[in-house]
Image (cartoon, rainbow, N blue to C red):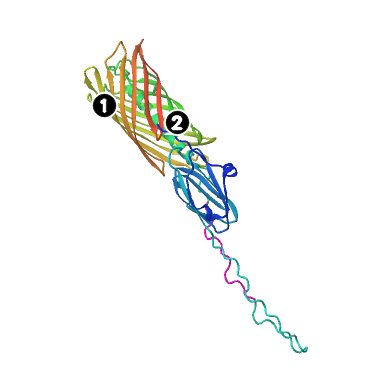
Amino acid sequence: MSYRTFFLASVSVLASGAAALADCTTVNGTYSPPAGSPQGVQFQVQPGDMISVSGANNITGQISGGGINIFYAGSIVQVSSATATSAATVQVTYGRLIGAAPSSVSISCTPGAVTPPTTPTTPPTTPTTPPTTPTTPPTTPTTPPTTPTTPPTTPTTPPITPTTPGVTETEKLLIDTGSQASAGTQAGNVGQAIRNAYQLVQGPQVSQNGVFFSSRNDPSQVRDVDFWFSVSGSKFTGAADGNGYELSMGVQAAFSPNLTAGVALSYNNIELINTAGKLDIEGLVAGPYFNYSTGALTFNGYALYGETDYELNGASADGDRLLYGLTASTQIDRAHMAISPYVSVTGYSESIGALGAAPAKDVDQASLGLGARIDFTSVQNMDPYLVLGVDAWQFDDGTTTTSEVTPRIGAGVLMPVGNGSVAIDFSAAEVAKDLTQVNVGIRYNLKF
């Protein structure tokens, strides 16, 4: 996993360590702040002076003053240039987003071409000969005063302000990361609970942390209705730190020894915290699912729809969420072990309402999973197992598309206890960019 530290220079940095610059041309150049040390400069501008910003790389900051307001973060510059509308002292702040990576930004200032009003070049002519007699009036000037032919030049480009004031890049990333963590975790937990409900937990089953109960204790039975209940927990580290939990339940009917279908309900709650603030997400979804076995292959799928609630630094927004998934698996018996390869296609789509200064948006993610579970021979009444896999996913938030290929690992041991079994599980996977989900816990499977 990787960690990122974000630095943003403040006005106090300018007051304490910045050098005052004489005019706008002296600010021209490329700035590279050292790691962990926010920087700042200031200089004078006159009306018509144009400030331009380019080549932003791993940097965040702002240029403001005299009607100028330019914001840059990472490699994004919100506006490329702005023109001063009044004489003022302009403040420039900049700092690194990732402490160990190279960081730079290029700033240039072009003095404005302000043409002042032209003053008369020929003064009025005064009479050279005083009147001699009352019949001769005084001579008036033959050349009237010259008026300015060129009006003062005004700036042709008005100041450009950010289109979404108050929204930072770190807040945007936290919302996207939270959506992936909440929906992805809920989809994984529901899918595992549905597989547990069909397989009736006759052997070791890797799952999230939690508790799973089923009202059926014999997979050969074909009953009218079965009920199951699952509790799971998660821990997140990396781009944000936090935790979450989920409650899932379902009712299913067995139409034949090979086909089971039912309805599932799932509620989850996660909390993530990083430099952008605190994000809480709740999700409640429900919908149908099925399990079907052909003997050699087993298929299971689900489609769940519901509502979400987001809270970021005191602002809240409602949304809706659609989860879907389809998995195919088989089993290959070998000496001292059973290998069960699988392939899965999962994903979700979600509409998130306006969250404070962040506008409403639609996001979606699709994932392809490949892997295998290995069950080893029982040792002293304990059944160890190992799961290895890889997930390839693509996330789209309407403006940016992110793709990743990440490993998945699970391991544990299952022991019979009374009429059920206890499994000590460990699993880990990257559920969003630079966000790792780790599960370590105990699962209890009860046979009624």
Q: Is residue 214 visible?
A: no
Q: Position of residue 412 (x, y in %)?
A: 34, 19
Asked if 369 appears above or below 106 in the picture, the reply is above
Asked if 102 appears above or below 21 in the picture, the reply is above
Q: Position of residue 95 (x, y in %)?
A: 50, 42
Q: Position of residue 342 (x, y in %)?
A: 28, 28
In which quadrant of the rendered view does residue 117 lie? bottom right
Magenta segment's dominant SS is: loop
> In the rendered view, does 93 fall on the left or right side of 229?
right
- The span picked out in magenta is 145-160
Q: Residues within 10 Å of mark 2 (few under 14, many from 20)?
A: many
Count of labels in the image: 2
User: Residue under circle 2?
Assistant: 283
Q: Residue at x 43, y 42 (%)?
A: 102
Q: Amino acid at mark 2?
A: Gly
Q: Amino acid at mark 1?
A: Pro
Q: Which mark is drawn over residue 341? A: 1
> In the rendered view, does 65 fall on the left or right side of 232?
right
Quadrant housing the N terminus? top left
Circle 1: element type:
strand
Instruction: Work out which residue is located at the far right of the displayed protein and give it.
Output: 134
Residue in front for this viewpoint, 106 or 340: 106
Q: How much space separates mark 2 and mark 1, taking CA atoms?
A: 31 Å
Asked if residue 71 is among those painted magenta in the image, a careful observer would answer: no
